[in-house]
Image (cartoon, coloured by chain):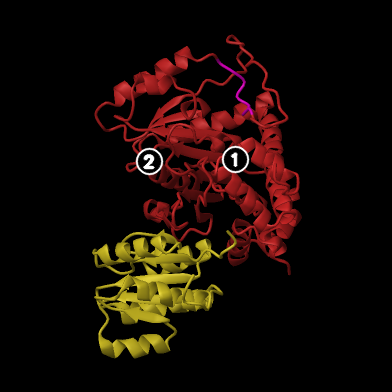
Chain colours: A yellow, B red
C-alpha cells in the first residue's frame, strides 16, 4: 500500500513518427507497477519539460530515432534545470550511435538503451535510480 | 517559505510538488491543505465523464482552449485539468494517456494539466482527486475540469464533486433502454453528443431526448448513501421553473464544432446554481460526503493499528474454512481479535 509509486513521463521528442518502442517500454513500466504518462508523437523539448513539471515525474524516458538526440537531449536537460527539476532522472532510448553515449551520460543522462534492450533492465535501472534498490 | 504559500504565490513547481504530496497522502500535504483550505470555494468545477472512446479528452482540450481564447469582450480564465485514468488491478501500474489529446494546450502558463491514476478507486475518480481539486482552487484556477476514467454505467462520483457534470455520448453506443437506466445519464447537467459528424447522431439524440421527457424533474442535489442518512422521496415539482432540464449539445471536438454552445450551456448552469442556491447545497453535500469518507478511512486505519497480523490471519482462516460467517468475522475482529 505505502510503496512509493514511481511516475514516469515517456515522451517522443522530434520528428520521427515511429512510437512502437516507446509504447512497448510504457507498457512494460506499467506492468512493473509504475504510473506512466504518455504524451504522444512530435513533442518539442519545451513540451516535454512542461509536462514533466506539471506531472512532477521522477523519471523521463525520451525515445529518439531521428538522430537529433545531441540537440534535443541537452535542451531538455537545460529546461529541466531552469525549472528547478534537475533531480529528474532522464533516460534515452532509440537509435543512438555508440560514440554519442558517453557524451550523453556526461551531460547528465542516467541510461541509454538501444535496440534489443531487455525491458527488465530498464525497469531495474529506473528503480535503482529512483528508490536506490533494484527490486520491489 | 512554506509549500502552501509558494502555491498561493503562483509557483508552478511548488504546486506540482504539493499535488504529489496530496496524491501520496503525505502528512506534509495534509498540513499544506489545512493552510490552503480557507482559499477554496471560488472555482467552478466542471466534470467530464462518459464511456471510453467518446472523445472526453479531445473535448476537454477544446473546452480549455476555448476558455483561454475567448471571443472579444469575454475575459480569459485560468484553467486546471485533472485527468484520471485507470490503474491496473494486478500491478497497480497505469498508462496515463489523456495528455496525448491535449497538446494544443502546451506552452500556455494559464493552463495546468495533471494526470492521475485511479489507484484502486472504483467510482471513476482517484481517492485524492477531491483534495487535488481543492489545491487548484486555492491556487487561483477559475475553472477546474475533471475528466473521469472512461466510465460505464455507475461511476457517478464525479456528480458529487463537480458543480456542472457533462456526460459525453457518441453515436452508436447504446439504445433507448440504456438511456432510461439509472446511473451515469441521470447525473448529467449537460448531455454532450460528441462525434456529431458520425452517422446515427439523430438516433442518439432522440434516445437522450426521450429519456429526458420521461424524467421527473428532481432537485439535483446528489444523495449521499451514507450510513447515517435517510434518503427522502425525490421532490416532484414538474412545473417548477427552478428545476434544471439538462440541455443536449452536439459537438465535434476535433473540429471545435459546438464548443461555443457548450460553453454557453455551462455558463447557464453556473447561473442556475447561483440563482437557485443549489451551489451551496451541492457544496454542503460534497463536504459532508468527504468528511464521512475520511472518517471511515481513519477509523479503519486506527482499528488496523489495534489488532495484530496474527489475530487478523487467524480469523481470516476461520472465515475461509467456513467456520464463521463474514459477519461473525467482523464481530470478532472489532472485538479486538477474540475468536468468535
Give the Cα distance between marks 1 and 2: 43 Å
> Would you say A113 lies left or right of A81 here?
left
Give residue A31's position: percent from left, percent from top: 39, 61
Q: What secondary structure prevails in the magenta region?
A: loop
The secondary element bearing badge 1 is classed as loop
User: Which residue appears farthest toward the top when viewing the image?
Assistant: B239
For residue A82, above or below residue B114: below
For residue B221, above or below residue A115: above
For residue A104, above or below residue B97: below
> Would you say A121 lies left or right of B110 here?
left
Label 2 marks which chain's residue? B
Magenta-span inclusion, residue B222: yes
Mark earlier in primary sequence (1, 2): 2
Per the rendering, the mark at residue B52 is 2
Q: Nearer the viewer, residue A33 or B325?
A: B325
Residue A115 occupies which quadrant of the picture? bottom left
Nearer the observer: mark 1 or 2; the answer is 1
The stretch of residues the image draws in magenta is B217-223
Label 1 marks which chain's residue? B
Please state, as top left, top right, bottom left or bottom right, where the C terminus of chain B lies in the image: top right
Give residue B161's position: percent from left, percent from top: 60, 39
Number of residue marks: 2
Please state, as top left, top right, bottom left or bottom right, where the N terminus of chain B lies in the image: bottom right
For residue B164, above or below residue B42: above
Q: Is residue A27 visible?
A: yes
The secondary element bearing badge 2 is classed as loop
The residue where tag 1 is placed is B323
Give residue B99's position: percent from left, percent from top: 41, 55
Amino acid at each position: 500500500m505505502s510503496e512509493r509509486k514511481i511516475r514516469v513521463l515517456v515522451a517522443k521528442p522530434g520528428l520521427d513518427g515511429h512510437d512502437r518502442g516507446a509504447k512497448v517500454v510504457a507498457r512494460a513500466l506499467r506492468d512493473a507497477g509504475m504510473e506512466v504518462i504518455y504524451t504522444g508523437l512530435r513533442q518539442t523539448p519545451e513540451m516535454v519539460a512542461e509536462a514533466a513539471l506539471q506531472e512532477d515525474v521522477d523519471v523521463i524516458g525520451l525515445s529518439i530515432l531521428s538522430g537529433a538526440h545531441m540537440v534535443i537531449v541537452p535542451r531538455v536537460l537545460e529546461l529541466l534545470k531552469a525549472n528547478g527539476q534537475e533531480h529528474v532522472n532522464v533516460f534515452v532510448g532509440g537509435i543512438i550511435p555508440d560514440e554519442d553515449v558517453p557524451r550523453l551520460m556526461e551531460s547528465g543522462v542516467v541510461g541509454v538503451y538501444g535496440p534489443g534492450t531487455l525491458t527488465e533492465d530498464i525497469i531495474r535501472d529506473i528503480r535503482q535510480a529512483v528508490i536506490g534498490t533494484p527490486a520491489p | 517559505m512554506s509549500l502552501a504559500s509558494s502555491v498561493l504565490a503562483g509557483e508552478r513547481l511548488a504546486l506540482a510538488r504539493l499535488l504529489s504530496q496530496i496524491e501520496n497522502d503525505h502528512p506534509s500535504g495534509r498540513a499544506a491543505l489545512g493552510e490552503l483550505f480557507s482559499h477554496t470555494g471560488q472555482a467552478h468545477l466542471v466534470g467530464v465523464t462518459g464511456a471510453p472512446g467518446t472523445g472526453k479528452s479531445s473535448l476537454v482540450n477544446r473546452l480549455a482552449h476555448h476558455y483561454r481564447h475567448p471571443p472579444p469582450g469575454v475575459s480569459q480564465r485560468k484553467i486546471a485539468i485533472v485527468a484520471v485514468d485507470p490503474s491496473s488491478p494486478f500491478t497497480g501500474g497505469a498508462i496515463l494517456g489523456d495528455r496525448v489529446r491535449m497538446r494544443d494546450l502546451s506552452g500556455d502558463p494559464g493552463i495546468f494539466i495533471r494526470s492521475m491514476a485511479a489507484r484502486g478507486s472504483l467510482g471513476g475518480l482517484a481517492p485524492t482527486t477531491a483534495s487535488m481539486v481543492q489545491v487548484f482552487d486555492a491556487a487561483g484556477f477559475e475553472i477546474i475540469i475533471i475528466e473521469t476514467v472512461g466510465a460505464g454505467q455507475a461511476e457517478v462520483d464525479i456528480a458529487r464533486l463537480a458543480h456542472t457534470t457533462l456526460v459525453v455520448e457518441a453515436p452508436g453506443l447504446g439504445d433507448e433502454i440504456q438511456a432510461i437506466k439509472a446511473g451515469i445519464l441521470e447525473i448529467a447537467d449537460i448531455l454532450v453528443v460528441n462525434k456529431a459528424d458520425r452517422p446515427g447522431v439523430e438516433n442518439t439524440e432522440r434516445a437522450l431526448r426521450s429519456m429526458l421527457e420521461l424524467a421527473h424533474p428532481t432537485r439535483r442535489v446528489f444523495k449521499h448513501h451514507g450510513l447515517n442518512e435517510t434518503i427522502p422521496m425525490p421532490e416532484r415539482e414538474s412545473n417548477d421553473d427552478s428545476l434544471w432540464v439538462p440541455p443536449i449539445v452536439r459537438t465535434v471536438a476535433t473540429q471545435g464544432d459546438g464548443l461555443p454552445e457548450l460553453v454557453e450551456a455551462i455558463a447557464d448552469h453556473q447561473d442556475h446554481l447561483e440563482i437557485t442556491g443549489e451551489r451551496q447545497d451541492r457544496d454542503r453535500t460534497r463536504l459532508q460526503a468527504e468528511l464521512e469518507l475520511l472518517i471511515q478511512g481513519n477509523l479503519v486505519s486506527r482499528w488496523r493499528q489495534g489488532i495484530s497480523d496474527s489475530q487478523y490471519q487467524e480469523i481470516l482462516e476461520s472465515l475461509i474454512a467456513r467456520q464463521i460467517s463474514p459477519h461473525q468475522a467482523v464481530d470478532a475482529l472489532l472485538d479486538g481479535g477474540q475468536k468468535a
